[in-house]
Image (cartoon, rainbow, N blue to C red):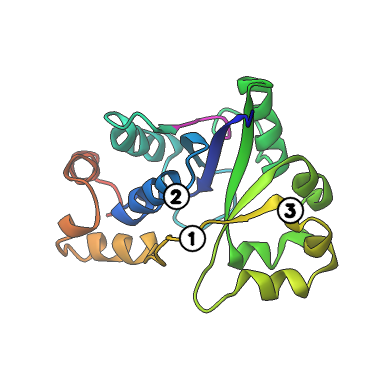
């Protein structure tokens, strides 16, 4: 019997937008083994420009997940005294959910092409499954062919058909907010209200 799956969707979510939610739901819909998809926001220890306060990004994701049975959010990276490597985050989640669950990591082909530069990439691919989302004109099979590491671990890579290629630029949304432009179409109403009430991205 196959184990139940927890899918891990990491990112800055700065802010979380409709495309993140739609993508998460499509992943769940197209992979029946997934019991829950968990958003894991990176902490401000991650050196990225204009990264909003940890608590605000976590709270916005909580708003998104509050009425969604199969969506959740984890503050596992926010509670550490250092920035975790992806493999460390997955290890902690594996420890939390136990042997009953299999932990799968969601990754775009843009990151997959760079995975050999990641911390412990061999162990990551041997111990965890990776849901791969094709970006731009990328073709997963071609990326695998060009990497000995990926070729050796191709059974760990899961390509789910039926996933739309989506616009995922929170950067553009932040710029629109700074300019005072209307962004209602890009995010849930409650998230926009949170941004306005807390004067974020001004």
Q: Foreground residue, 136 or 13?
A: 136
Cα separation between marks 2 and 3: 18 Å
Q: Quadrant of the C terminus?
A: bottom left
Q: Foreground residue, 102 or 161?
A: 161
Q: Secondary structure at mark 1?
A: loop
Q: Given the current orientation, which residue lies at the most extreme front position?
A: 1
Residue indicated by mark 1: 161
> Is the Cβ of the residue at disc 2 closer than 8 Å to that at disc 1?
yes
Locate residue 22 relative to residue 91 in the image: left or right: left
In the image, what residue occupies the spot 43% across and 60% down?
Answer: 163
Residue indicated by mark 3: 155
In the image, what residue occupies the spot 17% across and 62% down?
Answer: 180
What percent of the width, then of the height, locates residue 153? 79, 55
Locate residue 81 relative to residue 5 in the image: left or right: right
Cα separation between marks 3 and 1: 16 Å
Which segment is the magenta one? 73-77
Eyeballing the image, is 179 above or below 26? Answer: below
Cα separation between marks 2 and 1: 7 Å
Q: Is residue 66 magenta?
A: no
In the image, what residue occupies the spot 24% across and 51% down?
Answer: 187
Eyeballing the image, is 115 above or below 143? Answer: above
Residue indicated by mark 2: 30
């Amino acid at each position: 019997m196959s184990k139940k799956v927890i899918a891990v969707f990491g990112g800055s979510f700065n802010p979380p937008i409709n495309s993140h939610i739609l993508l998460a739901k499509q992943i769940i819909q197209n992979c029946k083994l997934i019991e829950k998809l968990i958003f894991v926001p990176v902490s401000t220890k991650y050196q990225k420009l204009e990264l909003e306060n940890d608590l605000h990004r976590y709270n916005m994701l909580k708003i998104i997940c509050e009425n969604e049975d199969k969506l959740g959010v984890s503050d596992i990276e926010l509670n550490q005294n250092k920035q975790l490597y992806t493999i460390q985050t997955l290890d902690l989640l594996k420890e939390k959910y136990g042997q009953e669950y299999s932990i799968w990591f969601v990754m775009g082909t843009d990151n997959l092409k760079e995975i050999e530069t990641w911390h412990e990439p061999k162990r990551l691919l041997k111990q965890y499954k990776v849901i791969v989302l094709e970006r731009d004109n990328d073709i997963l099979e071609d990326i695998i062919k060009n990497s000995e590491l990926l070729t050796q671990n191709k059974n760990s890579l899961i390509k789910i058909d039926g996933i739309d290629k989506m616009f995922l630029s929170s950067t553009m949304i932040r710029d629109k907010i700074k300019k005072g432009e209307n962004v209602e179409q890009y995010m849930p109403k409650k998230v926009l209200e949170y941004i306005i009430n807390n004067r974020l991205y001004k």
